[in-house]
Image (cartoon, rainbow, N blue to C red):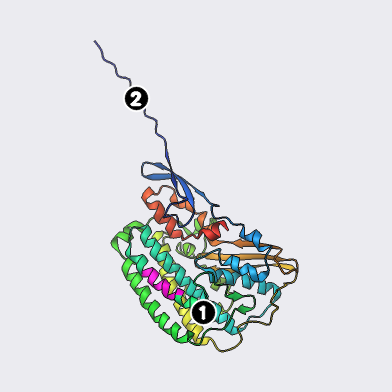
Amino acid sequence: MQVQQQARTADTIDLMINMGPQHPSTHGVFRVVIWVDGERIVKAEPHIGYLHRGSEKLCEGELYSQVITLFDRLDYVANLNCELAFCLAVEKLMALEVPDRASYIRVILCELNRIASHMLFYGVYGLDVGAMTPILYGFRERERIQGLFESVTGARMMHNFIRVGGVKEDLRDDFEPRMAVLLEELKQGIEECDDLLSQNEMFLARTKGIGTIGPTEAIDFGVTGPSLRASGVLEDVRISEPYSIYERFDFGVPVGTYGDCWDRYYVRVEEMRQSLKIIEQAMAQMEPGPVAANVRRIARPPKGEVYVRTESPRGDFGVFLVSDGSDKPYRLKVRAPSFANLQALQYLLRDAYVADAVVILGSIDIILGEVDR
């Protein structure tokens, strides 16, 4: 008697997992669908648009002075940097010369905003890798900057302070002594943040060699800012195409080596130190004077079009502006760095572990306000 067994063949399928749009680690209303084979991601598909407000279209129905408030809500962690980009575009179209003091105030506030933005990234990225303490340190330093912003602009986030032709008003009499104290506090704070997390054994294990992207691939995907410099590309709009008065300052550009999560993190830590250098030089060079050009309250730029690039905390932030000679933009288009940087996510997540998906996404430091617009 013979007993025969029939061989069974098991079919395997990739498991589809939804991450977001209400996931605490997606840094906003962002959804990414991932297909996994075991613990490895075989495919990732980002879904955006949950925060779309039609900002660019709304600009066509607003006065130039009112558009600034819409730019406050694009990158809502770096509001002043967005305001500056729009005002520079209008000023270029109108051939306006901004007073020196106004330019220095702009640079000081924008670099402080860069530090505040990176401090938020530092703290939240600590949470992404499982550490609770860094966010307490990061928010302590960020809160100091927010307090100064409130005393200067009257708001903690939606400032509406940078105006076409200059700034809303001059600095308060106590700004310089407060700034001197703040700079010393930030220097110490950055060192403490660096010592706390950067060389932590567990943090290194979670970020070193994870989510790597080379310089060629990064450029192909349109990646800019710290995420591009982390891949070894020396590109900073403040140096390659200086705007405002950035050519007057001596500062370095941190560059990574491997383009992994740790490099993207540490480039931002080093950038905070360089921003402090810029602020110190600006404070030393700034002199009394007017803070606004002699310009009409209701601006009417001549017919034409212009494109202006700036270096926001997330990368190359561009504004394309078309004027028909009226008091409202005919067309406005934003080149948002978070939107471009997000294009690399599919590449970065391929063959990564599921557990590393949040770490990789967090290292790009996206802001959904400028992704969706």
Residue at the top extreme, as displayed: 1
Residue 116, picture quadrant: bottom left
Residue 14, picture quadrant: top left
The amino acid pointed to by label 1 is Val
Q: According to the image, label 1 marks what residue?
A: 152
Residue 187 position within the rendered picture, expressed as x and y whole percent measured from the top left = 38, 78
Q: Does residue 256 appear in this view?
A: no
Q: CA distance from mark 2 to mark 1?
A: 73 Å
Q: Marks 2 and 1: which is nearer the front? A: 1
Residue closer to the observer: 168 or 256: 168
The amino acid pointed to by label 2 is Arg
Q: Are marks 2 and 1 in contact (CB under 8 Å)?
A: no
Magenta segment, principal secondary structure?
helix
Depicted 201 relative to depicted 14: above or below: below
Quarter of the image with the N terminus is top left
Residue 237 position within the rendered picture, expressed as x and y whole percent measured from the top left = 55, 70
Depicted 8 relative to depicted 47: above or below: above
Residue 145 position within the rendered picture, expressed as x and y whole percent measured from the top left = 45, 75
Depicted 291 relative to depicted 49: above or below: below
Depicted 96 relative to depicted 73: above or below: below
Residue closer to the observer: 285 or 78: 78
- The boundaries of the magenta stretch are 137-146
How crowded pointer 1 is (Cα within 10 Å; few <14, some 14-19, many 20+) is rated as some
Residue occupying the point 66% across, 74% down: 91
Q: According to the image, label 2 marks what residue?
A: 8
Task: Please tell me which of labels 2 and 1 falls first in the chain.
Answer: 2
Quarter of the image with the C terminus is bottom right
Residue occupying the point 42% across, 75% down: 144
Residue closer to the observer: 10 or 113: 113
